[in-house]
């Protein structure tokens, strides 16, 4: 197996069917984790592991923690701004906590990378990207040829107001409906 990041770098743009398959697997894993009161930290294409059939699972579970409630989150440290929600970037590193809402934002970024085969904000320095995301509402451009369902999910996941983002039960349902058509 390998990581989703390695697959995206190797293949560039993934087939739509494969994007949906991987997205369903990720959403299912995130839904399971959230349903059991656990916050996943730093959701990104490097932490999504694939087997030979491209079935995806969440890797690096050494950085999850039990929560008292689903909305409680955990202390956050990261080296990659590309997948981070604006509220995580803008927050005090000593107090900033992950939640399903920030994970939903990161999921939108993972979808975007699978659709485009690109690294978000690749032409910006990490500081430029961070300021743009947190202070200016910077989001990557969604390609015109992106399937409508994936575009809808990205837009909803990237909502500036965390509480209005889709949760993983909703994301999972939307993806399952889309692939059953």
Image: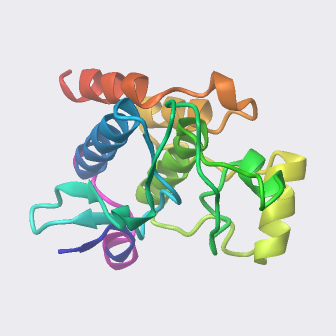
Residue 71: image location, x then y, percent: 57, 31
Residue at 84%, 57% in the rendered image: 132
Work out which residue is located at the far left of the displayed protein and give it: 53
Q: Which quarter of the image is occupied by the C terminus?
A: top left
Q: What stretch is highlighted in magenta?
A: 7-17
Residue at 64%, 67% in the rendered image: 77
How many numbered marks, from 0 up? Answer: 0
Q: Is the magenta stretch mostly helix, strand or loop?
A: helix
Q: Identify the image quadrant of residue 54.
A: bottom left
Residue 164: image location, x then y, percent: 65, 22
Work out which residue is located at the far front of the displayed protein and give it: 68
4 over 97 or under it: above or below: below
Q: Identify the image quadrant of residue 84.
A: bottom right
Give the colour scheme of this rendering: rainbow
Of 49 and 150, nearer the camera is 49
Q: Which quarter of the image is occupied by the N terminus?
A: bottom left
Residue at 23%, 56% in the rendered image: 56
141 over 130 or under it: above or below: above
Q: Is residue 9 magenta?
A: yes
Q: Is residue 11 magenta?
A: yes
Residue 136: image location, x then y, percent: 89, 49
Residue at 43%, 64% in the rendered image: 45
42 over 181 or under it: above or below: below
Residue 113: image location, x then y, percent: 48, 59
Of 71 and 161, nearer the camera is 71
Left or right, 32 with reference to 74: left
Q: Identify the image quadrant of residue 4.
A: bottom left
56 over 38 or under it: above or below: below
Of 120 and 59, nearer the camera is 59
């Amino acid at each position: 197996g390998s990581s989703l990041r390695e697959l995206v770098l190797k293949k560039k743009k993934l087939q739509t069917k494969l994007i949906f398959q991987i997205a369903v697997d990720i959403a299912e894993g995130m839904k399971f984790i959230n349903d059991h009161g656990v916050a996943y930290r730093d959701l990104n294409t490097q932490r999504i592991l694939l087997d030979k059939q491209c079935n995806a699972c969440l890797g690096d579970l050494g950085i999850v923690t039990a929560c008292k409630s689903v909305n409680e989150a955990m202390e956050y440290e990261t080296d990659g701004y590309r997948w981070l929600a604006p509220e995580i970037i803008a927050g005090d590193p000593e107090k900033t906590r992950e939640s399903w809402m920030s994970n939903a934002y990161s999921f939108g970024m993972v979808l975007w990378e699978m659709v485009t085969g690109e690294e978000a904000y690749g032409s910006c320095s990490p500081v430029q990207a961070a300021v743009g995301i947190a202070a200016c509402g910077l989001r990557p451009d969604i390609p015109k040829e992106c399937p409508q369902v994936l575009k809808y999910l990205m837009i909803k996941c990237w909502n500036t107001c965390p509480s209005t983002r889709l949760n993983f039960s909703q994301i999972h349902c939307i993806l399952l409906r889309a692939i059953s058509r």
